[in-house]
């Protein structure tokens, strides 16, 4: 690996403003900067055939079994927010990453990075939240780790979870399989998690309390696969929201995606908060939603099965895959115009006026 | 919260569009002054639905875009000082100065914080008396009253560690500068509704009369914009040039008297440089004499800093409506939101960013219209 050139200055597309490349917050935003970090730094450093898939989880064959394997770190502030906590996110996030390959999540690890001085009752509350979320998701936390960093070097508690699950026979779900003719379904209203966290983090109030949608999606995926194993792609639209997830699948599969803007379920409180702050609900994070790319003949039955499930009761068709504009997501606006829905650059920034 | 979906109703939009199509007989070019309107027009695809004869020219009303390079450099210099907590609205953080942006200052250890109000910055100053708390006061008449209020409160409460880096601009002198430009093609203005909700409409009849242009006060939601365009087209077709208020739910003729009093108390009119355009006489505000001690430029001695704009960037012509973003050779090649050459590519309200985000694939967008309906 010593020969591998990791000279960020020589990148053909320069880092923000060229010289002195350092990590900026946008590198963790799930948008274009994150993708560049992975593609230009991590993949050259330790890439391999499995990693090259760049899915939410890796699909492995081990001892004859097909495994999904995934890991994720959680640095949310505040630790507790309306509708959930960092403990819920840490379990549900990894469970959902596994579920997006069609796997049945089974076992998790959970590592705590604690900041010196954090009250133990807070750590206990987080640990209990991990336990309760694992029980709700039907998984067991079977190993873990604890580290402590100096006061001032962390936000109280950081969590890292990894998980494994079994992929059922006949199931092959990955972004590359999305194809023209697929119907795009979202499992429920979008934008709730991001706005819930923002409202408590920044002390903003929008008239009604917005609660996070954090939820484990393994059961919902199982219900969908009971209808047909031929689901092409699944993605949970977390950081970067629906826009980032659709762009990733469009890019990976080389199909175009057309989104019917008025079909996207946006709760009134989310729309109001976004209008107020100058944010676009399509780019706001979700933690209990999925996007499904389903061949048109199965779409109606899959949608019906989703709506029967508690975590998919608000499911709706929001678009379709087309052969035109490969790799690009286009929204048809309410008024009948069109616009490109781009991958976000980094974090969304509230506007001035 | 009400007043969002009601003003995006497709059936009502169709009726306004039908009226515009039925009224227009010749080509007209009108300028929407405010960047928020530009963003809304492009995001909702309003320009695609108008008759070919109606051309929208995107005006200089994005506060992020027109903040001059040297003011960004001053902000960066102040924000990098160890004793300073630099507070700003979020979208200023990515605006490039001569060699870096506020994100870069933050990642190098600078204390840069995003706030949602200048009063939040004032509260930080009260809570952390050992810090020098600076708020980046940019924007048009819309954001100026709250910034004036923050300085007024700082003096009243004796919060001496608060200061304001002021780069406020005013719309009417910019309209005049656009009309005086030798290459000006603008025949009417959609005035910025929220600016008028503060200032009222008294400044506009003189401009409408002097330059013979209709000025229609217009809001930001799709129906607001279509109604503004509808009234503007009617005036143009009839050969009229009046000031009309098409946004009465937010704008009163006299404006907001309390805000106007606060502005008059704290600020005074000054010449101001606009990024890409140059200095426009009387087009800005600075802190009045009694409040000068709260001026961050004075406090941190950055008043003499100056900077050159990149020659490749034609944002000045874009901001004056002389070219569309796509006509710039750097657009989408050396200049993208990832690597912006000018501020019009940075802010989501900037015309270049709006075109890049939503319109850079127009040929594809044409074929999309033929895709069969969904669900």
Image: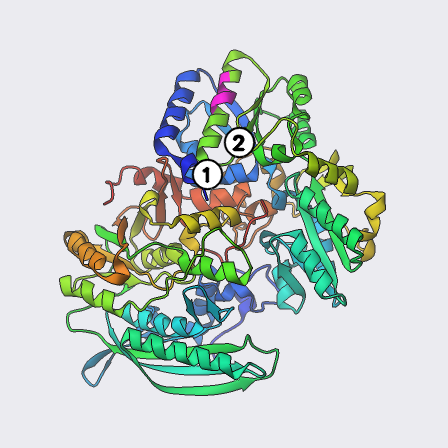
Residue B313 is covered by the magenta coloring = no
The residue at 43%/48% (across/down) is A271
According to the picture, the residue beneath numbered tag 2 turns out to be B249
A330 with respect to B255 (left or right): left
Which secondary structure lies at badge 2? loop
Q: Residue furthest top?
A: B238
Q: Position of residue A319 (x, y in %)?
A: 28, 48
The numbered dot on residue B3 is 1
Label 1 marks a residue whose chain is B
Real-space Cα separation, disc 2 to disc 1, in angstroms: 10 Å
Can the viewer see residue A1? no
Q: Position of residue B336 (x, y in %)?
A: 52, 50
Q: From the viewer's perspective, is residue A240 above or below residue B16?
A: below
Principal secondary structure, stretch drawn in magenta: helix
Q: From the viewer's perspective, is residue B209 above or below residue A331?
A: above
Residue numbers of the magenta segment = B230-234
Can the viewer see residue B35? yes
Q: From the viewer's perspective, is residue B282 above or below residue A24?
A: above
Label 2 marks a residue whose chain is B
The residue at 33%/79% (across/down) is A163
Q: Position of residue B341 (x, y in %)?
A: 59, 50
């Amino acid at each position: 690996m010593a020969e591998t050139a990791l000279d960020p200055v020589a990148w053909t597309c320069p880092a923000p403003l060229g010289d002195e490349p350092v990590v900026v917050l946008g590198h963790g935003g799930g948008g274009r900067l994150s993708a560049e970090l992975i593609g230009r730094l991590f993949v050259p450093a330790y890439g391999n055939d499995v990693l090259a898939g760049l899915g939410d989880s890796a699909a492995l064959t081990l001892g004859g079994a097909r495994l999904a394997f995934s890991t994720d770190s959680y640095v949310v502030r505040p630790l507790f927010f309306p509708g959930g906590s960092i403990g819920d996110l840490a379990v549900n996030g990894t469970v959902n990453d596994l579920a997006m390959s069609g796997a049945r999540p089974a076992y998790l690890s959970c590592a705590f990075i604690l900041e010196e001085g954090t009250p133990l009752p807070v750590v206990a509350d987080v640990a209990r939240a991990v336990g309760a979320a694992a029980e709700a998701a039907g998984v067991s936390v079977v190993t873990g780790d604890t580290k402590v960093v100096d006061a001032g070097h962390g936000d109280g508690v950081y969590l890292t979870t990894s998980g494994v699950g079994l992929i059922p026979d006949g199931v092959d779900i990955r972004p590359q399989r999305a194809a023209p003719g697929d119907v795009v379904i979202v499992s429920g209203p979008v934008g709730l998690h991001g706005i819930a966290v923002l409202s408590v983090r920044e002390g903003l109030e929008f008239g009604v309390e917005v609660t996070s949608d954090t939820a484990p999606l393994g059961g919902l995926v199982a219900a969908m696969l009971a209808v047909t194993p031929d689901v092409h792609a699944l993605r949970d639209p977390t950081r970067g929201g629906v826009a980032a997830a659709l762009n990733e699948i469009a890019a990976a599969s080389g199909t175009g995606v057309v989104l019917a803007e008025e079909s996207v379920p946006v709760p009134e409180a989310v729309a109001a908060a976004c209008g107020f702050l100058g944010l676009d609900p399509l780019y706001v994070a979700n933690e209990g939603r999925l996007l499904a790319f389903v061949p048109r003949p199965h779409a109606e039955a899959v949608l019906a099965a989703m709506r029967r499930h508690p975590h998919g009761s608000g499911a709706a068709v929001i678009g379709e895959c087309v052969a035109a504009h490969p790799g690009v997501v286009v929204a048809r606006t309410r008024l009948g115009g069109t616009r490109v829905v781009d991958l976000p650059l980094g974090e969304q920034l509230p506007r001035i006026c | 919260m009400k007043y969002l979906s009601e003003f995006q109703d497709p059936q009502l939009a169709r009726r306004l569009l039908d009226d515009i199509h039925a009224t227009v007989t010749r080509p007209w070019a009108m300028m929407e002054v405010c960047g928020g309107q530009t963003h809304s027009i492009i995001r909702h695809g309003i320009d695609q639905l108008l008759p070919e004869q109606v051309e929208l020219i995107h005006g200089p009303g994005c506060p992020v875009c027109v903040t001059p390079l040297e003011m960004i450099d001053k902000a960066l210099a102040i924000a990098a000082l160890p004793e300073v907590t630099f507070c700003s609205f979020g979208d200023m953080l990515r605006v490039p100065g001569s060699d870096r942006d506020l994100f870069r200052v933050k990642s190098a250890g600078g204390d840069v914080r995003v706030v949602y109000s200048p009063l939040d910055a004032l509260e930080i100053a009260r809570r952390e008396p050992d810090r020098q708390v600076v708020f980046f006061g940019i924007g048009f008449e819309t954001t100026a009253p709250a910034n004036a209020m923050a300085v007024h409160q700082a003096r009243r409460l004796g919060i001496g560690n608060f200061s304001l880096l002021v780069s406020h601009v005013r719309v009417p002198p910019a309209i005049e500068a656009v009309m005086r430009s030798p290459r000006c093609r603008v025949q009417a203005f959609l005035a910025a509704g929220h600016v008028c909700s503060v200032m009222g409409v008294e400044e506009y009849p003189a401009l409408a009369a002097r330059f013979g242009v209709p000025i229609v006060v217009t809001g930001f939601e799709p129906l607001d914009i279509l109604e503004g365009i509808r009234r503007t087209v009617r005036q143009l077709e009839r050969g009229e040039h009046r000031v009309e208020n098409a946004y009465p739910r937010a704008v009163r003729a006299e404006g907001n008297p309390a805000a106007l009093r606060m502005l008059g108390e704290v600020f005074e009119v000054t010449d101001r440089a606009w990024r890409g355009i140059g200095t426009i006489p009387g087009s800005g505000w600075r802190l009045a004499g009694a409040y000068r001690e709260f001026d961050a430029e004075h406090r941190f001695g950055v008043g003499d800093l100056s900077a050159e704009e990149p020659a490749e960037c034609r944002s000045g012509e874009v901001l004056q409506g002389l070219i569309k973003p796509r006509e710039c050779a750097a657009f989408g090649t050396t200049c993208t939101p990832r690597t912006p050459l000018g501020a019009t590519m940075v802010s989501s309200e900037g015309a270049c960013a709006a075109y890049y985000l939503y319109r850079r694939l127009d040929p594809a967008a044409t074929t999309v219209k033929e895709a069969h309906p969904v669900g």
